[in-house]
């Protein structure tokens, strides 16, 4: 499937002379203000032909209309006295015609003061944001999002990633706003605060695991998996509205550490669908994708609990022998006195070098990476669309969603291709 550029939202600011009063308009003590009033309107241009940066080559796409709609805008102008002095809220849009694939929308005119070196901020669809003349805009945050909003993995869809009203932000400096007949113009680019996680692997595809390192018993000839569902750990619960170098360090579905107790209910699973999330720059706590997989013996679903026993053979060599069920395991070792009441007891099984896969289910995980980042590549960057697709499975996953103590962390290999939204294409090998 071709990857297309997503939204690049630009807003052109047209300032015209006039006298008027708007919400929270003030020009007292503005060091760079001329004192003359002007009227301004915002011209939004949604360019479907040109996108933001791309790490690797690819074509462009805007995504869905639900991801670039605009309902309300808050504009903040700072004339240089240390705090934003002009705030205009609840600006509405009127659609207009653009050239080619460009979509145009403009606000009604609103009053400003002529001046020089004016810092302009734009907040698109600012649901729930409290912006005042004294607000520290660099510290302005979207607020806590530490709970899922429904039965899926969605957790920011009520405001930051609301259908048709995604929160976007941007800033620029206007060199000069003049009180004259001719229009003053400036351009500011806005981007979404959210990132988009899009797992696209078909859950009907059977991945045959070649060279699995397992020894098959009975009528088992080969092993494979179907990826039934996915989840994410370390979903950031808060974010700055304007882009900042550091991100918040609080998480929904915290990552379960290697060797920790875990079960199928430790994470919430989605079969399909997109999850919008907040940016995460933490190298210590990266956002990871997790997979829940059904094991197959050949083309037959392993729909009951199966067992793997580590058996020493020649010298220090170890065979990992696969048994379809408890009875098959017992039959292979008739000289061992097995306790049937403890076939679900992991401690008892571990004492016999056995691990079990409940219901034939196994698990995989991998960090999600952003190509082209200067620090750790295991980051989630706002306005990025991460497309995740598993292309290969090379080994059997773990019995629980947590890595086992002896496991290496590299279960999945992800090749990330970033394209405009910016979009991340993740080709995953398990």
Image (tube, rainbow, N blue to C red):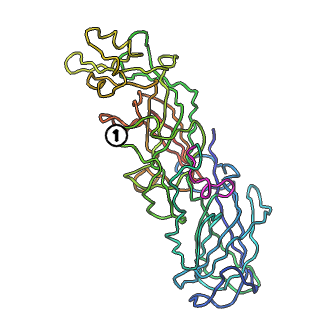
Residue at the extreme right of the image, as rendered: 97
Query: What's drawn in magenta, residue-wise?
Result: 152-165
Q: Nearer the viewer, residue 202 or 90?
A: 90
Could you tell me what secondary structure mostly forms the magenta stretch? loop
Query: What quarter of the picture does the C terminus occupy?
Result: top left
Q: Relative to 112, is 315 on the left or the right?
A: left
Q: Quadrant of residue 202?
A: top right
Residue 308 x %, y % = 35, 21
Tell me what residue is drawn at x 56 percent, y 55 percent.
194
Q: Is residue 164 shown in magenta?
A: yes
In the shown orientation, is residue 169 left or right of residue 146?
right
Is 276 left or right of 40, judged from the image as shown? left
Q: Number of numbered discs present?
A: 1
For the residue pair 68 and 322, the one nearer the viewer reads as 322
At numbered mark 1, what does the secondary structure look like: helix, strand or loop? loop
Q: Nearer the viewer, residue 114 or 227?
A: 227
The spot of residue 380 in percent (x, y) is: 49, 52
Q: Is residue 358 magenta?
A: no
* Residue receiving disc 1: 260
Q: Residue at x 63, y 41 (%)?
A: 2
Residue 262 at x, y percent in the picture: 39, 37
* Position of 158 relative to 10 (above/below): above
Q: Is residue 174 above or below residue 405?
A: below
38 or 350, nearer to the observer: 350
- Residue at coordinates 63% horizontally, 38% vertically from top-left? 1
Name the outermost residue toward the left: 315
Residue 166, x across and y down, in percent: 64, 58
Judge whether 40 appears above or below 61 on screen: below
Label 1 crowd bin: few (<14), some (14–19), many (20+), radius 10 Å:
few
Q: Is residue 333 above or below residue 375?
A: above
């Amino acid at each position: 499937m071709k990857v297309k550029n997503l939204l690049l939202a630009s807003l052109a600011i047209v300032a015209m002379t006039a006298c008027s009063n708007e919400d929270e308009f003030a020009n007292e003590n503005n060091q760079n203000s001329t004192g003359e009033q002007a009227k301004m309107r915002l011209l939004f241009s949604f360019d479907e032909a040109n996108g933001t940066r791309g790490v690797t080559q690819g074509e462009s796409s805007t995504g869905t209309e639900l991801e670039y709609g605009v309902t309300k805008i808050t504009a903040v102008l700072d004339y240089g006295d240390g705090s934003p002095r002009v705030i205009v809220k609840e600006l509405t849009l009127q659609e207009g015609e653009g050239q080619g694939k460009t979509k145009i929308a403009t606000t009604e005119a609103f009053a400003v003061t002529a001046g020089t070196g004016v810092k302009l901020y734009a907040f698109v669809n600012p649901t729930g944001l409290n912006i005042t003349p004294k607000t520290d805009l660099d510290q302005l945050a979207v607020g806590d999002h530490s709970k899922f909003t429904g039965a899926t993995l969605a957790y920011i869809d009520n405001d930051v990633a609301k259908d048709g009203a995604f929160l976007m932000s941007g800033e620029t400096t206007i060199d000069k706003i003049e009180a004259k007949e001719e229009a003053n113009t400036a351009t500011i680019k806005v981007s979404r605060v959210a990132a988009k996680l899009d797992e696209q692997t078909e859950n009907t595809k059977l991945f045959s695991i070649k060279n699995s390192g397992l020894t098959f018993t009975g009528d088992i000839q080969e092993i494979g998996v179907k990826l039934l569902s996915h989840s994410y750990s370390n979903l950031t619960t808060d974010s700055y509205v304007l882009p900042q170098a550091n991100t918040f360090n609080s998480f929904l579905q915290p990552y379960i550490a290697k060797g920790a107790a875990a079960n199928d209910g430790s994470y919430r699973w989605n079969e399909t669908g997109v999850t919008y999330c907040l940016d995460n720059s933490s190298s210590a706590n990266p956002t990871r994708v997790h997979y829940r997989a059904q094991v197959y013996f050949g083309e037959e679903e392993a729909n009951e609990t199966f067992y793997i026993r580590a058996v020493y053979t020649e010298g220090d060599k170890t065979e990992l022998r696969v048994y379809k069920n408890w009875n098959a395991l017992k039959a292979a070792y008739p000289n061992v006195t097995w306790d049937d009441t403890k076939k679900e007891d992991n401690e008892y099984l571990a004492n016999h070098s056995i691990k079990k896969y409940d219901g034939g289910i196994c698990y995989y995980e991998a960090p999600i990476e952003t190509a082209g980042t200067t620090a750790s590549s295991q980051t989630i960057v706002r306005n990025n669309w991460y497309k995740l697709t598993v292309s290969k499975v090379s080994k059997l996953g773990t019995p629980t969603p947590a890595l086992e103590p002896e496991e290496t962390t590299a279960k999945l290999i992800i090749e990330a291709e970033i394209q405009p939204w910016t979009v991340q294409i993740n080709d995953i090998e398990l």
